[in-house]
Image: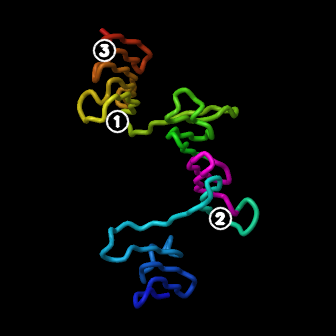
């Protein structure tokens, strides 16, 4: 297909569709390649338009019928304005219209502290893992600024894999409490005497 004298759409042997280009994409994702014409702003995209109460969907399928047609889903639900991600046929992550994120939770906005809600009331343990290597620390930080200075971490919890201790910090980098690897509780000091 041509737009005036410029080739706009190419359908190659085997069914590959190229829009705005004559070169297919990476071999693992080359069935549809969309490119921006030279000289434009450089932005390329796809718009999925649905009704104000409908869903915009991208389905990942491994079958031609049944549950296999929607094993993976990226869905924007206009009724409520949430973005949802499904794996193995079930919703796993939701970003609500107000910004709360639910992992394994479809209603994170109902929780009091709801920026990130992990888990649900289905039986079984839930949790978050901070993974580092053996010469590093895992940290959960609390901040009230976007400036890259010492105040960016007013408080944090740190687990050192080097010495296998957990420490609690307040007012910046001031360690207040430490639990040593052998279970000693140190308050206001970092080593037992």
> What is the basis of the colouring in this image?
rainbow
Quarter of the view holding residue 94: top right
Mark 3 lies on residue: 191
User: In the figure, residue 107 lies in which quadrant?
Assistant: top right
Which mark is first along the chain, 2 or 1? 2
Residue depth check, mark 3 versus mark 2: number of the one nearer the observer: 2
For label 2, the crowd category at 10 Å Cα-Cα, with few meaning under 14, some 14 to 19 and many 20 or more, is some
- Location of residue 147 in the rendering, given as x and y in whole percent from the top left corner: 26, 35
Rendering coords of residue 40 (x, y %): 33, 72
Mark nearer the N terminus (3 vs 2): 2
Q: Residue at x 44, y 39 (%)?
A: 131
Alpha carbon of mark 1 to alpha carbon of mark 2: how far? 40 Å
Tell me, for residue 31, which label it has, or none. Answer: none
Q: Could you classify mark 3 by the number of other residues whose Cα lies within 10 Å: few (under 14), some (14-19), or many (20 or more)?
A: few
Q: Is residue 177 magenta?
A: no
**Rendered location of residue 76, percent (x, y):** 58, 53
Q: Is residue 173 left or right of residue 75?
A: left
Q: Relative to 125, say whether 68 is above or below.
A: below
Determine which residue is flagged by label 2: 61
For residue 40, side relative to residue 67 (left or right): left
Disc 1 secondary structure class: loop
On the image, the x and y values in percent for residue 16 come to 53, 80
Q: Which region of the structure is painted magenta?
A: 69-91
Residue 136 circle label: 1
Where 25 falls versus 124 (above or below)? Answer: below
Count residues near mark 1 (Cα–Cα under 10 Å), then give few for <14, some for 14-19, many for 20+.
Answer: few
């Amino acid at each position: 297909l041509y737009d005036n004298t410029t080739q706009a759409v190419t359908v190659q042997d085997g069914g590959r569709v190229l829009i705005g280009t004559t070169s297919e994409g990476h071999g693992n994702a080359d069935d549809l390649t969309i490119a921006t014409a030279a000289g434009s702003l450089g932005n390329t995209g796809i718009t999925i338009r649905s009704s104000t109460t409908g869903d915009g969907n991208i389905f990942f399928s491994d079958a031609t019928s049944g549950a296999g047609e929607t094993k993976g889903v990226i869905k924007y639900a206009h009724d409520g304005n949430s973005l949802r991600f499904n794996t193995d046929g079930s919703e796993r992550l939701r970003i609500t219209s107000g910004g709360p994120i639910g992992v394994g939770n479809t209603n994170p906005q109902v929780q009091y502290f709801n920026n990130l809600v992990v888990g649900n009331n289905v039986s079984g343990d839930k949790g978050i893992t901070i993974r580092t290597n053996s010469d590093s620390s895992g940290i959960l930080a609390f901040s009230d600024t976007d400036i890259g200075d010492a105040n960016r971490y007013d408080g944090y919890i740190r687990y050192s894999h080097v010495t296998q201790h957990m420490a609690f910090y307040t007012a910046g980098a001031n360690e207040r409490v430490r639990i040593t690897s052998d279970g000693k509780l140190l308050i206001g000091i970092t080593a037992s005497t």
